Every structure is written in C-alpha cells, then in structure tokens.
C-alpha cells in the first residue's frame, strides 16, 4: 500500500458521519454499526479504476469524470463521498468517463450499498451468493463481515470479473468469484442463506429461490417495467418451506439491469403509423406519478406488468409541455400522449392493445384503493409466476 492508501481511513470518517446523519448508519444498532466499521476496513478506492465517472448524490458534489493521474484530489474525494462510480459503459465499448455511453457497471454509492447490506441481515455462519460482482467492492465487504470462504459472487462480464479478482486480492480478500450468468445462480455451491443481488431485476429468477435455504433471504433492486429502468425499489424476499418466496418493498434503488432483462432497444415508441384518439386524462398526471409515488408505480406494475412508461419535457405545438410514451415490453403496442392547453389531449396508439386505457384504469385502481404507499405492497414468487399484492399475499 502507498502512503495515500494507508491514509484512506482518514477519508472514511467524514463519509461515515454523512451516512449516519442521513440515517443510513444507525450506531445504536449492532449490525448497522458493523457495516460502518466495514467502510473503515475495506478500502473502497482499491475498487475504483484510475479513470471513471462519479455520479454524485451528496449535496455539494457534482457528477463528473474522475482521473487519478490528472486530478488525484478529486479522484480520492469521489472514492470517499456518497457517489456511485460508473466503471463501465456499453459493456466496455465506451470509456467509463465518457457520459455519452450507457452505464453497464458501477460501484454502488456507499449509502445504497449499506442499505442493501443491512437489509440482507447476515449472521456470522451465513453463506452468501452475490449476483453482479462488478469491480468487487460489495463482495469484499461481505467477505470482511463473514469470511472469504462464505461468499460466492457471480459476474457476467469477463473483463469485470478479472478486474474484481485482482481488486479483492489487493484488498486482502479471497471470496469465490465466478464468471457466468447470475440469473442461473450458482447451483454447484448451493444452498445459500442469503442472496445479495446488485443488478436490477424485473422478474425474479426462480433459480435464486431454489438455491436458498428455507427461511433464507434474498435482497434485490426491483426495477418494475413502468419506471422504464429509471428507478426501482429495495425488495427483501424470504424463502418459504414450500419453495415460494414472499416479501415487501423498502426504500428506493436505481440499478443497472440484469443483462437478460435489459429492455430491448427497439423502435422509439411513437414511431410508425398509429391510431389517433383523444383523452381527458392529463398525461402530466402520469409524469408526476413516476418519480413521486412508489405505490402508484407498484399498482401499475401489478395491473399492467409489461408496460414501460417514459415521459419527457419537450417543446410542443403550443409551448413547453410533457410527452408521455407507453410501450409494451412483451409486444409491439405503444402509445404517445402530449399535454396541451385544451380540455382534451391527443393520444396516438399503435399495436393491438389500448395501452392508454389500461394505464389509466390502473391509475384509478390506485386512487380507489386510497393511494396506498409502497410499504403496503409486496411480491410473491413461485416457480411459475410472480405476483404483486396489496396488504396481504392472499
Ligand atoms: C451495479 S453493478 C455491481 C455493483 C457491485 N456489486 C459493487 O460492488 O458495487 C452491476 C453488475 O451486475 C452485473 N450483471 C448484470 N447482469 C448480470 C448477470 N446476468 N449475471 C451476473 N452479473 C450481472 C453487471 O455486469 C455489473 O457488473
């Protein structure tokens, strides 16, 4: 370790203070305090490439390219603030510090990483399967908390897997790292007591449930279709003795999708000819829902599970307004509706479904249920299907 590396512990203190002030670390809770100690013991900077891109959450920080050679002070700062650090774009085709590329791997921000680790609720004897090693930081945190031999982590991207293997070794850990498709879990080394998923999931792969001991827990960033991969929620599932899993939603979480569940890049919704109609339901109502009401998003995910909703602020015929796109991820239906000054709004729809009507009906089901928040929803996964429920699984 260089003298700078040795001094990383001085940099961790302010980060821990920040996370405690945010309520992420609760010093009165033994498990939460243990993860704060983990931040001191596992040098996060070892997992940050020399050139990357800091996506800042902490006030006073900006999103920016970081370069250890060109500006070491800024690079170190990004390593020890509540920043997610983008470490790969376009599966490696674009440099991580080039913001024009789509992020495909990041080192999770400490705040959200600790929230998930806390939700995982590990005990000293647990064996953990992690999905999405990335550059290896959370696998090293788990290896620090348990032991290297109790942690198995799977990464689909061979270059990242190699990098992670080098990084965990430099940090002093040796969890079992596997290169492969984490959607299949790692059957040969099952059963696990805990599964820690660090990529976004729309459909929970049943393999994870099969490979988890009854009573075990799976935590994952649940990224339902309606939010169009722009946002998601923390989900903690408990595996039951009948081979199903059941659990509730917690705080927010935005993650890169599990590779096989990435949205297909098809024609932009609204392309091609469509049927023109009109609606009195204001598209701004949907735009408003997406970022603000997790309960509404879950109701939409329950009732119209394959419909992605995206909205954009655009210059429209009569000034700036909102354009809402709907798209059926399981078919070719789409709809576009623009806000405007009149009493009615034009809707253009394509394909064999009336997506606008379906989404509107789901929205009003949420209103009729009394605007339930995310804490009233949960998810059940069986070998054949997954179901979002309100209040109780039955
Ligand atoms: C947010 S990053 C991982 C964060 C990481 N655990 C950390 O230490 O902060 C998500 C990772 O999931 C990986 N991934 C995506 N799909 C996967 C799959 N099917 N199997 C295994 N890994 C996958 C991506 O390649 C990426 O490295």
Image (cartoon, grey):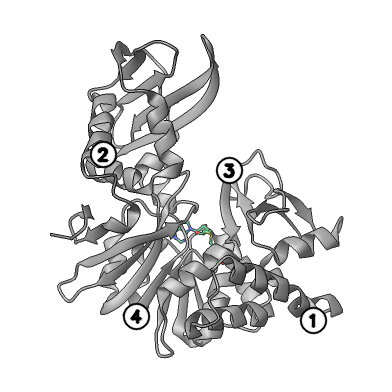
Secondary element at image label 1: helix
Q: Which quarter of the figure has residue 42?
A: bottom right
Answer whether residue 387 is visible to the viewer in this image: no
Q: Compare residues 224 and 331 and report the one nearer the observer.
A: 224
Q: Which residue is mark 1?
A: 6
Identify the residue at image location x=14%, y=72%. 242
Question: Going from the N terminus, do you reach mark 4 or mark 1 first?
Answer: 1
How far apart, in angstroms, are the residues tagged by discs 4 and 3?
Answer: 34 Å
Q: Compare residues 299 and 276 and report the one nearer the observer.
A: 299
Q: Which mark is residue 102?
A: 3
> Cβ–Cβ below 8 Å for labels 4 and 1?
no
Question: Going from the N terminus, do you reach mark 3 or mark 2 first?
Answer: 3
Which quadrant is home to the C terminus?
bottom left
Q: Which residue is mark 4?
A: 193
Identify the residue at image location x=21%, y=58%. 391
Question: Going from the N terminus, do you reach mark 2 or mark 4 first?
Answer: 4
In the image, residue 16 sits, relative to residue 91, either above or below, namely below
Give the farthest residue toward the front.
Answer: 370
Secondary element at image label 2: helix
> Cβ–Cβ below 8 Å for labels 3 and 1?
no
Q: Which residue is mark 2?
A: 367
Answer whether residue 214 is visible to the viewer in this image: yes
């Amino acid at each position: 370790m260089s003298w700078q590396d040795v001094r990383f512990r001085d940099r961790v203190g302010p980060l821990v203070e920040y996370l405690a002030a945010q309520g992420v670390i609760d010093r009165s809770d033994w498990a939460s305090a243990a993860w704060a100690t983990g931040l001191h013991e596992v040098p996060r900077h070892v997992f940050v490439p020399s050139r990357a891109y800091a996506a800042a959450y902490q006030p006073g920080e900006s999103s920016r390219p970081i370069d250890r050679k060109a500006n070491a002070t800024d690079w170190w700062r990004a390593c020890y603030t509540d920043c997610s650090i983008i470490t790969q774009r376009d599966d490696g085709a674009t440099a991580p510090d080039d913001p024009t590329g789509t992020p495909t791997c990041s080192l999770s921000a400490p705040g959200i990483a600790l929230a998930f680790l806390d939700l995982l609720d590990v005990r000293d004897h647990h064996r953990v399967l992690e999905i999405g090693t990335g550059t290896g930081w959370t696998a090293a945190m788990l290896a620090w908390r348990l032991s290297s031999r109790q942690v198995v982590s799977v990464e689909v991207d061979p270059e990242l897997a190699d990098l992670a293997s080098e990084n965990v070794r430099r940090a002093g850990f040796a969890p079992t790292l596997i290169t492969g498709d984490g959607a299949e879990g790692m059957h040969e080394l099952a059963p696990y007591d805990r599964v820690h998923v660090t990529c976004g999931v729309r459909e929970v792969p049943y393999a994870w449930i099969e490979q988890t001991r009854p009573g075990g827990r799976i935590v994952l960033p649940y990224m339902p279709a309606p939010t169009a991969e722009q946002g998601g929620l923390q989900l903690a599932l408990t595996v039951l003795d009948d081979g199903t899993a059941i659990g509730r939603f917690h705080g927010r979480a935005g993650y890169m999708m599990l590779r096989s569940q990435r949205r297909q890049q098809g024609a932009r919704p609204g392309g091609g000819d469509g049927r023109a109609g009109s609606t009195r339901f204001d598209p701004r109502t949907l735009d408003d829902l997406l970022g603000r009401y997790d309960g509404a998003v879950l109701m939409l995910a329950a009732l119209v599970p394959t419909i992605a909703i995206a909205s954009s602020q655009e210059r429209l015929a009569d000034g700036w307004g909102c354009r809402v796109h709907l798209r059926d991820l399981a078919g070719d239906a789409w709809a576009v509706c623009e806000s405007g000054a009149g009493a009615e709004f034009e809707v253009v729809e394509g394909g064999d479904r009336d997506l606008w009507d379906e989404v509107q009906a789901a929205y009003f089901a949420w209103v009729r249920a009394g605007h339930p928040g995310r804490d009233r929803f949960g998810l059940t996964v069986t070998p054949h299907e997954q179901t979002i429920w309100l209040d109780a699984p039955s």
